[in-house]
Amino acid sequence: EAGVAQSPRYKIIEKRQSVAFWCNPISGHATLYWYQQILGQGPKLLIQFQNNGVVDDSQLPKDRFSAERLKGVDSTLKIQPAKLEDSAVYLCASSPVAGDSYEQYFGPGTRLTVT
Amino acid sequence: EDQVTQSPEALRLQEGESSSLNCSYTVSGLRGLFWYRQDPGKGPEFLFTLYSAGEEKEKERLKATLTKKESFLHITAPKPEDSATYLCAVLPSGSARQLTFGSGTQLTVLP
């Protein structure tokens, strides 16, 4: 079974520029998450989708961050304009929606450096 | 507010030297507690889910236990390949599958 795919793996941009990240979840997983992980900290949830609907985006800085999940499969996360404090690893995870399985499966992440 | 605290922040062990990592949590109601392993440059890898106090789960040299206030990850006779950051996360009752993570324990096992 293929895992969660993310691209790019690394990105360096200047502040005030824009950037986009892509995620393809595990096949059949209806729930998709985007996390931000700052160095030395645990992942922090930014947004959760179930199919193509948003379940929770309460911690997403909506003035600069946006995310979509068209057709309930792939997802993109965008930052515009970027700030220095956005430097972090952006992780995508997916999980099945039904039953008692709450495990989330993570992709390798995209390391963003804002200079 | 849900809170997860992991200790120690970092731990260095000699190969074969057993030890335990701690995860204490404050949550209104616990649906599940999760342990993940994270290697440098990679995403977290799922290890265990614990659902109720008294529950234990094992995988190779790792054993996770759960009480009403904390969880322990016991590492027996560790090897250098066990070196990684171990993350603990809680899933509160009523949550729509949203995990709250601790900051992790960085484990280094020296040969």
Image (cartoon, coloured by chain):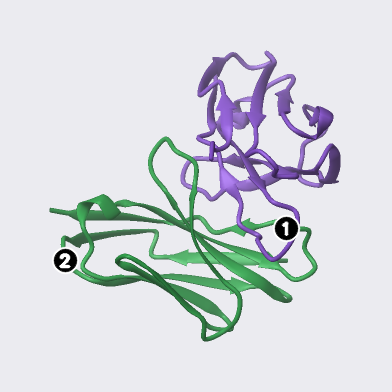
Residue B10 in the image: state x and y as whole percent: 34, 57
Mark toward the start of the polypeptide (1 vs 2): 2
Q: Is residue A42 left or right of residue A70?
A: left
Location of mark 1 (residue): B97
In what element is the residue under mark 1? Answer: loop
Q: Residue at point 78% right, 58% down?
A: B96
Location of mark 2 (residue): B16
Q: Provide the letter of the chain coloured green.
A: B
Q: Residue at point 16% right, 61% down?
A: B14
Q: Is residue A59 above or below residue B96?
A: above
Q: Is residue A63 visible?
A: no
Q: Residue at point 12% right, 53% down?
A: B111
Check contact, mark 1 vs mark 2: CB within 8 A: no
In what element is the residue under mark 2? Answer: loop
Q: Provide the letter of the chain coloured purple.
A: A
Where is residue A46, by image quadrant?
Answer: top right
